[in-house]
Every structure is written in structure tokens, then in C-alpha cells.
Amino acid sequence: MVKQDGNAAEPEPGDDLAGAFGANVRRRREEAGLTLEQLSTRSSVSRAMLSKVERGEKSPTIGVASRIAHALQVSLSDLIGAPAAAASGVAVVMRKTDRPVFRDPETGFERHIVSAAPGAGRAEMVVHYLPAQVSTGLLPAYPPGTEKQLVVLEGALTVAVGGISETLNAGDSLFFQADADHGFANRTDAPCEYIMVISRRT
């Protein structure tokens, strides 16, 4: 959560991003049969950084985390620790206190997974918080067929994709194909909050 002064809120109880993220990276890497060196080459993240991430000694920035996820061909939510899809039942509930949250240790950017069962369908919903004067930087392209839609809830958001830059205000929405590098920036002195839906081909 972002406080009104634009700073990241204190970590909520049970938030252990570094440990959970690192364990998931190592598990996925071993399942893929990759060495640290091979993953380093694929992700353009140094072997030393990957080793620290896997051991839970370093929380990655959103850019590093995204490159690792793409190199492993998994979603960022999978590495964060998204809840598993329900095997049966009409409805699935996830309480706010149970949300998996990614926090960028350098910028205070937050990514909250709000899909109660993200593996149950083609779409995943997340909430992003960008403190004042914070940017995610350019994030790597998703596989072809991936689409993103977002609506700004608070503040102003500048989205860069495919050489185009659009600034959105509260209530504005945007759709784009995510198979190109793209990034999000808050160029104002107030926090920004937006909901994003990510759709992938099955």
C-alpha cells in the first residue's frame, strides 16, 4: 500500500518476498533443468544476483524480477506466490490480508495479486501502486497474444509501449498488446494506483 505522502507503507505481517520469491525461482530453474549460468544468460541478470535472490538474501527490483520470470517462461505472479486455482467450487475468495504482494525495495513500487484464482482462467488481475516520481523502467515483452488492460484509480499514469507514450488520469483506461517492451511511470508528486488485467492465450 502507498501512504498519502507517496512513501511505501510498512510491510504487512507475513510478508516475506525475498524468501518466497527466491525459493520459487530456484524451484522453477531446477524444474527447467537450468544452471545459474544458463539462467543468467537468458535473463541478463548476473549470476551473483541470481544466487542472492535464490537464497533470499536480496529482494529484486521489478525490472530484475520481470526478466527472471520471462527467462523461466513463467508469470511474475507464479514467482511471487499466487494462490493456486480452486479445483472445485462455485466461488473462490481471497481476503485482502492474504494478497501476495511484490514490493520493489528501491522504488517502493507495489504489485498486489488480487485474482482469487489466477490459474483458473486466461485473465489475471493485479493492483499496482506507484509512489510519486517513480517509474518501473521498461519491462520485457510478454509472449505474443498477451494483452493488458488497465484503469487508473488515483493519480496520473504515463504508459510507454511500442514507442508510444500515453498519460492517463483517474478514470482513464487503456488496452495494449504486451508483446513489446513497455513501462509505467508516475511523473507527479502524488501517488498513483491502477488496476491491470493481464490476458494470456491458453
Image (tube, rainbow, N blue to C red):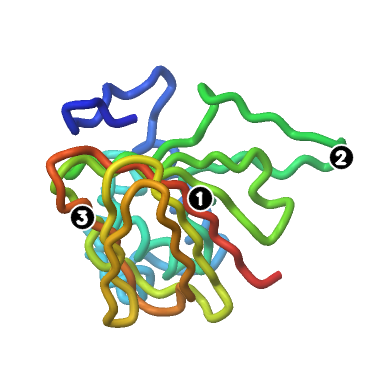
Which numbered disc, 3 or 1, marks the residue closer to the eye? Answer: 3
Does residue 121 show up?
yes
Point 51% across, 69% down: residue:
73
Residue sitting nearer the eye, 110 or 84 = 110
The image's mark for residue 77 is 1
Q: Which residue in the protein does label 3 denote?
A: 135
- Counting from the top left corner in percent of width and height, residue 174 is at 44, 64
Residue sitting nearer the eye, 97 or 56 = 97
Q: Which residue in the protein does label 2 denote?
A: 88
Relative placement, left or right, of 192 versus 125 is: left
Determine contact: label 3, label 1, CB under 8 Å.
no
| Dot 2 amino acid type | Ser
Relative placement, left or right, of 3 versus 115 is: left
- Counting from the top left corner in percent of width and height, residue 36 is at 35, 64
SS at mark 1 in the image: helix
**Total labels drawn:** 3
- Counting from the top left corner in percent of width and height, residue 112 is at 45, 39
Rendering quarter of residue 95: top right
| Dot 3 amino acid type | Ser
